[in-house]
Image (cartoon, coloured by chain):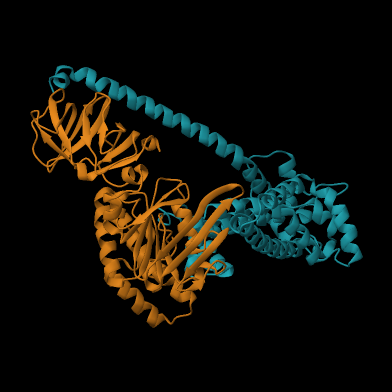
Chain colours: A orange, B cyan
Amino acid sequence: MAHVRLNGLSKSYGKVDVIRDVSLDIEDGEFVVLIGPSGCGKSTLLRMIAGLESISSGQLDIGGIPMNDVPPRDRGISMVFQSYALYPHMNSADNMSFSLRLAGEQEEKRRGKVERAADILGLGPYLDRLPRQLSGGQRQRVAMGRAIVRKPEVFLFDEPLSNLDAKLRVKMRAELKELHMKLKTTTIYVTHDQVEAMTLADRIVVLRDGMIEQIGTPLELYDNPKNAFVGAFLGSPTMNLLDLEVPADNPTMARFSDGETMRLAGPAQPGPATVGIRPESFSLGSEARDGHLRAEVVVVEPTGASTELVVRKAGQNITILSHERLSAKPGDTVWFAPDAGRTHAFPAGSAEL
Amino acid sequence: MSHVSDTPGTMTLPDRRFSVSERQVAVMRHIVLLGFALIVLFPFFWIVSAAFKTQIDLLMGKVLFTPRIEGFLDVIFDKTSDFARNFANSMVIGLVSTFLVLVIATLAAFSLYRLQWPAWVLHSLLGWSVIFHMVPPITLAGAWFTMFRSVGLDNSYTGIILAHTTLHLPMALWMMGVFIRDVPKELVEAAQIDGARVPEILRHVVLPIVRPGLAATGILTFIFSWNEFPVVLVLSQRQTATVPLGIGKYAQENTIAFTEMAAASTLSILPALLLLLFAQRFIVRGLTSGAVK
């Protein structure tokens, strides 16, 4: 196990900067998730840590040792690829023990290690099967087994669950978490799935255009997004981003274009603003009350456990998540009140980012 | 439901008509395939049957004849015939040059496509190899003869093997390039992380996966070398002559020994045929399935 230190890492292909000045301290045993939209450079960053991409500038330390020019095999890492990258001509056991074989370990020892990993992953019956004879989930496990047997200092995962169907993904996600709790190996995990990030991570790193937008625990990022991008990226249904006006005489309020106002968590910059409110931070009513705003129901989506309501207020759609059974129909009028303490005021126009 | 029971006749009629037309298509397809098979196989049949005829039967164009094996016996055992020697020469030259071609082409293709060369290296090498392949071999043969002569490699196995290796390397490089590119990049990366260096990646990961490609390229290279005529004609003399030269020798100034020529040709098909049968089991499709996704 080891801590990983990224100090001003950059990567450019010719004139295009893919990773720009990324600094990050990952503690020993920590599970860090790199998340961002496609093209944000998260996979490139992971591959730079793995040694599969060169580092243009900056410093990478693993376990306190500079790793910039160390080949992948000597970095003490193992990696699980999105495509699994299993050797097609080797059975599961050989796939898992390939690194040990290269390291010159004895057959006996190798078998013991593979069997232990197979035990952890429930792969016992599949050890002599070829990758093509395995299901997606089993291949995924073999790929993880291959990573485990090396006893690496750091695990690197590159969107390991994205090739699985929804159900299996949830199952493997739980297994991954359990595995991390068992092994306590430093883990860096790349995904574009915010649910994976929220459920797995000790800390989440949100990346955009090769730069870090925000670092924090899942709930820190969820509750206190630094900007509208982070706010909208984490959470499902997505955070509402409303274009409102903050009056100069009362900067703790924000005004819709129809003149109605809502309270903010604190004073904001007067002028136009983007206000973020999560769908669950509303209360609903069927009649006018103080502090409630009037809106028209556009869509009602009951999921059983909760109901997602899309309402239109002053020309803007707002998604509201309610855990009550609602009888509202499209076209109805509803009254809603945002939870002022859980509103986020961002600079105007940041909704478009 | 009612729709179906209302119109039983119309329900079955189009069905039957469809099946008839499908059968017609199948018959047509087989006729066409048979035609192609005939076009391909008839020359073989002609040569093989000619090998069993007497010169007189052959020249008279007899269709029915008593098969005789004198032609073969003459080719193989006659004191004046070099065919056995030619056959052995072809074997040595074909096998060794094929082996060299496969080794060089595989290493080169792996290096070009999987180690990080600048794009111009890849393109200029591949481009050059095509241009080289476009030059008629006979134009090279003269130059090679002069060069080999000055270093004592004319009329030697080494000279001919070098020439054949050079001649067939471009094609092999292109073919192996395709097969190597088919090996997913992630596999090479996974092997790198697992601790493999380039020779180990080649041996344990790439070679087992491109085995079908090696078999296909090897067969083609061997057949090309086996049939190559103009270059050996220039570079070899009696001791190092190969099978095509041996066959050619039956066409002499005054007579053409058609029967012996046909017998020698028939015999010369055998090694390639055996090699094909042997290598066929390596040419399996879908060997990479299960590797990625």
Task: Identify the residue at image location x=14%, y=32%.
Answer: A292
| Image side of residue A52 versus residue A93, left or right | right
| Image side of residue B102 versus residue A320, left or right | right
Figure quadrant of the N terminus of chain B: top left
Q: Is residue B184 visible?
A: no
Task: Identify the residue at image location x=79%, y=45%.
Answer: B135
Query: For the image shown, how many numbered marks are present on the structure?
Result: 0
Residue B256: image location, x then y, percent: 81, 47
Say which of A232 and B11 sits in front: A232
With respect to residue A306, does B241 lie above or below? below
With respect to residue A173, does B18 lie above or below? above
Say which of B83 and A304 sits in front: A304
Residue A239: image location, x then y, percent: 27, 41
Residue A76: image location, x then y, percent: 45, 72
Say which of B185 and B137 sits in front: B185
| Image side of residue A166 versus residue B151, left or right | left
Say which of B111 and B51 sits in front: B111
Q: Is residue A224 visible?
A: yes
Task: Identify the residue at image location x=32%, y=62%.
Answer: A141
With respect to residue B93, does B49 lie above or below? above
| Image side of residue A189 versus residue A177, left or right | right
Residue A124: image location, x then y, percent: 28, 69
Q: Quadrant of residue A202?
A: bottom left
